[in-house]
């Protein structure tokens, strides 16, 4: 599953530099996660780094982007190949 950021985001800028996949960017009103780039940090860390640092706990898993571990690993390898 990719993660998603809810409208509880306070735009504190803390998560964006922590993402190893450059999946987080500023959206129209608050930060957003690109589901094509979010691996739940699989391939990089044991825990999602954005969730670790978010002060308001507004980054749940995205039920619209359900993926198993194998799919997340495949996404990680694809992103690595892209450089
Ligand atoms: Fe980036 Fe990891 Fe958060 Fe996904 S879970 S947005 S890869 S920091
Ligand atoms: Fe928003 Fe949380 Fe990221 Fe801060 S860490 S910008 S509150 S999602």
Image (tube, helix red, strand yellow):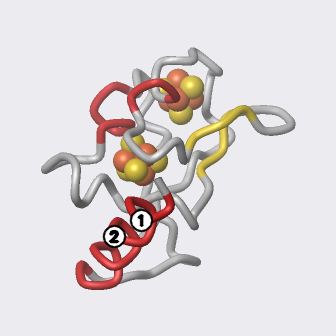
Are the residues flagged by discs 2 and 1 in contact, CB closer than 8 Å? Answer: yes
Which corner quadrant holds the N terminus? Answer: bottom left
Please state which of the two labelled residues, at mark 2 or mark 1, is closer to the viewer.
1
What secondary structure is marked by label 1? Answer: helix
Of the numbered discs in the image, which one, if any, rests on residue 77? 2
* Residue 79 screen position, x and y as percent: 45, 62
User: In this image, 25 relative to 39: left or right?
Assistant: right
Pointer 1 residue:
81
* Residue 68 screen position, x and y as percent: 30, 83
Crowd around label 2: few <14 · some 14–19 · many ≥20 (10 Å): few
Question: In the rendered image of this protein, does residue 66 appear above or below residue 81?
Answer: below
Of the numbered discs in the image, which one, if any, rests on residue 32? none
Measure the alpha-carbon separation of dots 2 and 1: 6 Å
Q: Residue at point 57% right, 40% down?
A: 24
User: In this image, 57 relative to 28: left or right?
Assistant: left
Question: In the rendered image of this protein, does residue 9 appear above or below residue 11?
Answer: below
* Residue 58 screen position, x and y as percent: 49, 40
* Residue 80 screen position, x and y as percent: 38, 59
What is the number of callouts on the image? 2
Q: Residue at point 22% right, 49% down?
A: 44
Q: Residue at point 62% right, 34% down?
A: 8
């Amino acid at each position: 599953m990719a993660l998603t950021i809810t409208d509880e985001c306070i735009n504190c800028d803390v998560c964006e530099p922590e993402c190893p996949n450059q999946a987080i960017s500023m959206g129209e009103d608050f930060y957003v996660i690109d589901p094509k780039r979010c691996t739940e940090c699989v391939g990089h860390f044991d825990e999602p780094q954005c969730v670790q640092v978010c002060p308001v706990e507004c980054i749940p898993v995205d039920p619209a982007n359900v993926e198993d571990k194998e799919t997340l690993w495949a996404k990680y390898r694809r992103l690595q190949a892209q450089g």
